[in-house]
């Protein structure tokens, strides 16, 4: 290994005119070599790895909510098909429901607030009222603290129905269409123009 160093030094001396190197010249060359190494190493690899893992977890969370929303829509479609198929004149029925948003969980929070009112009077007979208020919120946890449990969910808001399409064997009968429309409106509160009823083949 010592011989390799000597050979390397001889090669460097051959490259430099005069053949002699001072210590400061060697130090500068060494620092220049380290700088070139640092520049050559890709620095973005670590940061892109972190950002891709973050986006991966966000994608998995969004895909999980999409799956829950799709499952909710399929359940609602199955229930509506069951109800409509028992109505007079409807016959065989297929339903498709689109949702406006996914379900939303409302976390319980402790709200603390203070209000202070100060009235000042001046010698001229005028008065001025100043009001100061502060408000703070803290999340309530099942186990009492964030380390001991998960946030306490006070309620869960179901997704809103955006539109409904119904294919029914009796979809060409005006009375059946009216009955289906009224049933869907009663169940989901959807506007009439967002309900489409057609005859099924």
Image: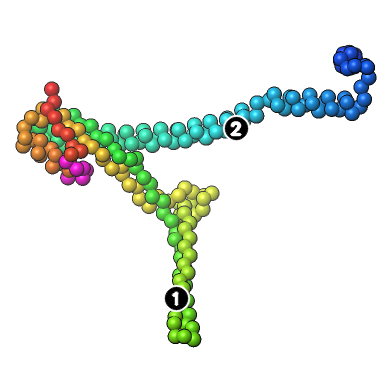
Q: Which residue appears at 86% of the width and 15% of the height? A: 15
SS class, disc 1: strand
Q: Is residue 79 visible?
A: no
List x then y, in percent, for residue 93: 15, 29
List x then y, in percent, for residue 118: 47, 76
Does 106 lie within the magenta span?
A: no
Q: Distance between the residues labelled 1 and 2?
A: 54 Å
Q: Name the residue under label 2.
A: 47
Task: Tell which of 22 and 140 is nearer to you.
Answer: 22
7 relative to 56 in the view: left or right: right
List x then y, in percent, for residue 5: 88, 17
Q: In which quarter of the image is the C terminus?
A: top left
Mark 2 Cα within 10 Å, few/some/many (few <14, many 20+)? Answer: few
Please name the colour scheme applied to the rendered image. rainbow
What numbered label is drawn on residue 129?
A: 1
Q: In which quarter of the image is residue 109?
A: bottom left
List x then y, in percent, for residue 69: 33, 36
Sequence order check, earlier mark of 1 and 2 = 2
Q: Give the range drawn in magenta.
A: 186-192
Q: Can residue 95 be seen in this view?
A: yes
């Amino acid at each position: 290994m010592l011989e390799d160093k000597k050979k390397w030094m001889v090669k460097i001396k051959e490259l430099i005119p005069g053949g002699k190197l001072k210590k400061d010249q060697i130090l500068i060359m060494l620092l220049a070599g380290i700088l070139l190494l640092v520049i050559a190493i890709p620095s973005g690899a670590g940061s892109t790895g972190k950002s891709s893992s973050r986006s991966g977890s966000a994608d998995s969370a969004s895909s999980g909510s999409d799956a829950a929303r799709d499952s909710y829509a399929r359940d609602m479609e199955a229930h509506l098909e069951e109800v409509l198929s028992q109505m007079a004149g409807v016959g065989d029925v297929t339903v498709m429901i689109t949702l406006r948003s996914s379900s939303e969980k409302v976390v319980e929070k402790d709200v603390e607030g203070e209000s202070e009112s100060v009235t000042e009077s001046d010698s001229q007979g005028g008065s001025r009222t100043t009001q100061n208020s502060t408000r703070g919120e803290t999340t309530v946890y099942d186990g009492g603290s964030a380390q001991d449990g998960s946030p306490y969910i006070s309620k869960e808001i179901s997704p809103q129905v955006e539109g409904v399409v119904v294919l029914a064997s009796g979809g060409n009968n005006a009375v059946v269409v009216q009955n289906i429309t009224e049933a869907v409106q009663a169940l989901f509160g959807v506007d009439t123009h967002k309900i489409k009823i057609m005859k099924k083949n």
